[in-house]
Amino acid sequence: MRIGELSERTGTPRRLLRYYEEQGLILPDRCANGYRAYDERLVDRVLQIRGLLDAGLPTRIIKQILPCLDKPRLIHFSDATPEMIATLEDERDRMTRRIECLTHNRDAISEYLDAV
């Protein structure tokens, strides 16, 4: 598929898809005429990337963990460094704090809506 179709199917602007490519997060094939050709599997990959970005992970971390997301039950980094593990633990803890804050805010809004 071409970039326009991938953009439409994922709700991701073309410019952002090109950025993902520059960052090495997606790797489209190239046709003989130089156009990008996106495989069907990249629809799910782009949605994964967007979800991880929405969760607050930077692209440099996403690039490291994407290979593991293809096989979610077989996550293993053969070359995981102590620094990488510490970074992932920090990101996980930061996400947990964010989830707790969002949950608190959601509950407060629900209480307000129940009262009015």
Image: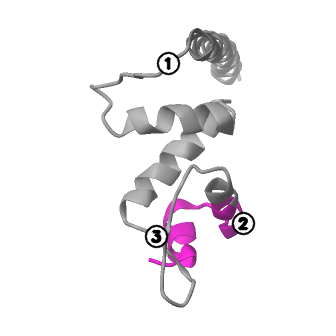
- Identify which residue is drawn at 67% across, 14% down: 94
Say which mark, if any, is on residue 13: none
Q: Nearer the viewer, mark 2 or mark 1?
A: 1
Name, please, the residue furthest toward the bottom: 33
The local secondary structure at tag 1 comes to loop
Give residue 87's position: percent from left, percent from top. Answer: 64, 15
Q: Quadrant of residue 34?
A: bottom right
- Magenta-drawn stretch, dominant element (helix, strand or loop): helix
Sequence-first tag of 1 and 3: 3
Give residue 8's position: percent from left, percent from top. Answer: 54, 70
Say which mark, if any, is on residue 80: 1
- Identify which residue is drawn at 60% across, 51% down: 24
The kind of residue on which mark 2 rests is Arg
Q: CA distance from mark 2 to mark 1?
A: 32 Å
Q: Quadrant of residue 16?
A: bottom right
Q: Which residues are magenta?
A: 1-18
Sequence-first tag of 2 and 3: 2
Tag 3 residue: 38
Give residue 76's position: percent from left, percent from top. Answer: 36, 22
Q: Is residue 55 above or below residue 33?
A: above
